[in-house]
Amino acid sequence: MADDALIGKTIGSPVEMVVERGKIREFARATMSRNPEYLDDPEPFSEPTYLTSVSFWGDPSETPIKELGIDLKRLLHGGQSYTFYGPPPAAGTKLTARSRVEDIFEKEGKRGGTMKFIVMVQEFRDHLDELRAEARSTLIVTGQTPEGS
């Protein structure tokens, strides 16, 4: 299980992804967007939450969650936010994503014992190694598995 020694460490393998025009359109439709900038533009920028799709690009056996030793039965998604350094990446942009542990802390839960919070930051850099965006997510690991699991 993740401990404080991991704070600031990069974990998992870097993941390369190419922002594809067709995938921007598919993502827009999946999120029920009707914005013609995502659906019809020949060189669209990606929707702000499009970067979530990076999880489909990497090797599923090498996820940060696995490296952190988290039991999926005890994992909750505590939140997600994005920061962009310029416009969202446009179709054709090649990005490399790397994950690091930003913080780890605990809180007492009301029903499930102590909960561990792991704040992860995923940096997205372009071919010039310029930081284009960051995705910050909070993982919550409950103190015990839900009943009946």
Image (cartoon, grey):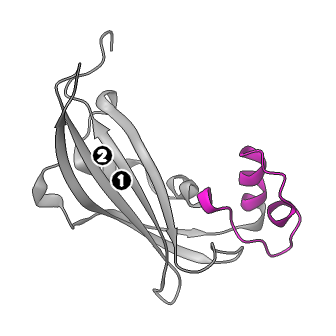
Badge 2 is on which residue? 66
Whether residue 30 is in magenta: the answer is yes
Quadrant that contains the N terminus: top left
Circles 1 and 2, Cβ within 8 Å, touching? The answer is: yes
Mark 1, Cα crowd under 10 Å, few <14 / some 14-19 / many 20+, is few
Residue 114 in which image quadrant: top left
Residue 62's disc number: 1
Residue at (19, 28) in percent of width and height: 143
User: What element does badge 1 sit on?
Assistant: helix
Callout 2, which amino acid?
Answer: Lys
Rendered view: 115 above or below 81: above
Say few, some or many: other residues with alpha carbon within 10 Å of mark 2 (under 14 / 14 to 19 / 20 or more).
some
Q: Is residue 1 visible?
A: no
Residue positioned 23% across, 19% down in the render = 111
Is residue 35 highlighted in magenta?
Answer: yes
Query: Is residue 33 shown left or right of residue 5?
Result: right
Quadrant occupied by the C terminus: top left
Q: Is residue 112 left or right of residue 38?
A: left
Toward the viewer: 70 or 40?
40
Residue 141: name its quadrant. Answer: top left
Q: Position of residue 12 (x, y in %)?
A: 32, 60
Residue 112 in the image: above or below residue 7 = above
**Residue in the image at 30% along x and 39% along y:** 140
Which stretch appears magenta?
23-50
Kind of residue indicated by mark 1? Glu
Left or right: residue 104 compared with residue 18? left
Image spot of residue 64 (x, y percent): 32, 53
